[in-house]
Amino acid sequence: MPIHEKSLIRPENLHVQENLEVEGVDVSGHWSTFIESRVVTDYNEAIEDEISALPGGEYIHRCWQCGSCTNSCTVHAINEEFNPRYWIYLIRMGMESELLRDKDIIWQCVSCNKCTYACPRDVVPEGVMKATAHWLELKGHTPKSHSTIFDEIFSEQVIETGKIEDGRTIKRFFKQTGQALMQPWMVEMVKRMLRNLPIGLMTRMGMANFIKPKTSDWSGARDAIKEYVSEQEAHHRTALGLDDLVKMAESELKASGSH
Amino acid sequence: MSDKKTKYQEVAYYPGCALEGSGHAYNRSTKALGKKLGLKLKEVDNWNCCGAMEVKNIDPKLQTYLSSRVMSIAANKMKMDVVMAPCNGCYHNLKKAEYDLQNDEGSKDVVDRLSKKAGHETYQAGQVETIHALDWVKETIGEDGLKERVKNSLKGIKIANYYGCMYTRPRHIFPEKDSGPGSESTSKPHFMDDLLDAAGAENVDFPLKTACCGGAHTLSDSDTSTKLVANILRTAEAAGAEVIATECPTCHSGLEMHQIRAEKTLGIKTDVKIIYFTQLLGMALGLKPKQVGLHENVSDSFDFVKKKGLA
């Protein structure tokens, strides 16, 4: 079945008449399955341009729907609903409501690059997944995913100090996402570490709270990166029309305030 | 001596952040192995994080800059022409930066602008060659050299060689791979198999050499990673492996962490040991388990290596 017809045969769109006779022929049950007629009118054709404007989404227009990405996908193998080819199709067609049905799983791409390896058109589907997840968050369709929170904590630390220390990143991540650090499997892992490492690693992880690993002479790079990142963020906001949205809201607030 | 053999005798060593933290065993064993083999490692001065799996999601060109800074120091300050990175993530990112700087004007502009502002020379594509620890051992010592040096053969140890994602994908950033006899393959990598085989190991037929462990989401989507890792561990055991040999600190810690998590949350218990290939080679060459950091692994393989005559 062509991928664009997939949504037509969802259970809620199928109607089966228990008793139906057509021109004297009994077509009850299975033989009288009807598909709800549907005319798509809610296209949002800006989506493709918006996603192309975000890092990773640049080459979405090259896709010719061969399906190699989904076929090779690590996450698809454990969750059939994870379907990069389908999402690329929906984005290019502007079928926003259909795309939003899967909004809570798109961020789960593990960046294994199997799709990018398999893609014959150099679409870089892995990048498109990241751009789409990013788009969903910027547009307010989803809250920041755990993956984004982790990326931000990590990147912030790299930008500040030039380096990463695992223990510190992990602790901040668990705190920020409201998860208990000492879950049973984590306790078991620490126990196993301690078995052969009475002080070594744990001390190192603990010490890192006081002596933060950092790249010396980093301040020049830090300032340059910060300036660049805020420029890029502004650029993405403009591409997604978010600035206009804010301006509109501001002027409405002003107008209501003047009464 | 072949060109590479001469060229790789002394390399700039880029351990990266993981090797100073959770992957310290890999750092220790790589250095010990180099020393044992008479190869010189000069750590990159004042290196920074390559961007790992995270910075690219904030901005890919920023990741290119971070990786380029490391190569710039190696080339311009240290006057080295080879950078060796044992971590798959670092290796991948340096390769990716090299590719982007050769092919993408936009990346070049960002790197040039950030380098100037940061006050160091801009890295120019082609100034250094980035290699993995596997290339390093394979090209300098090779199978024949290892065979001559083996003290404790890995004979009778059944190993599944696990390469992960970042060492081979995507193909285009590794132009030297898939380039005829002697080169590494991106679909069926074999350098680790070759080296461990030379040290006497019995490599099993492992179909998931380049499967993904979910390393990028090991904490942010642990349930997915646990499923992926459980599959890797069970498949290795089904193939008869007693050990999974690793070459990446993210894969290695991911396998260790989710081996425990699979047992605790899914009731899937596996006993396969997880050991860095540098630890296995080091012990084969006569180094003690502690010299290769076996005590720094979470996966406890002391009794196992003793039983196999390596300690």
Image: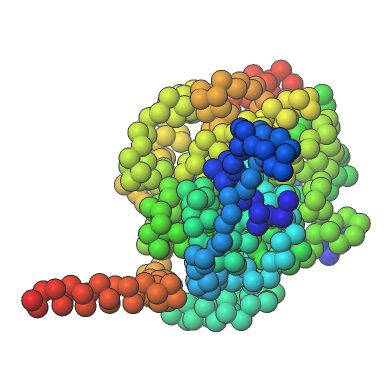
Question: Could one spot residue B47 in this view of the protein?
Answer: no
Q: Nearer the viewer, residue B235 or B71?
A: B235
Horizontal side of B294 relative to A64 (left or right) equals: left
* Residue located 63% across and 77% down the image: B104
User: How many numbered circles does the render carry?
Assistant: 0
The color scheme shown is: rainbow
**Residue A221 appears at what percent x and percent y?**
42, 71
Horizontal side of B309 relative to A98 (left or right) equals: right
* Residue located 35% across and 43% down the image: A177
Q: Nearer the viewer, residue B181 or A229?
A: A229
Horizontal side of B36 relative to A221 (left or right) equals: right
Image height of A221 relative to A15, above or below: below
Q: Nearer the viewer, residue A148 or A189?
A: A148
**Residue B60 appears at what percent x and percent y?**
54, 66
Asked where in the image residue A31 lies, by quadrant, the reply is: top right
Image height of A121 relative to B189, above or below: below
Q: Nearer the viewer, residue A246 or B126?
A: A246
* Quarter of the image that includes the N terminus of chain B: bottom right
**Residue B208 appears at what percent x and percent y?**
74, 39
* Residue located 53% across and 55% down the image: A98
* Residue located 44% across and 29% down the image: A186
* Quarter of the image that includes the C terminus of chain B: top right
**Residue A141 appears at what percent x and percent y?**
41, 57
Question: Could one spot residue A237 in this view of the protein?
Answer: yes
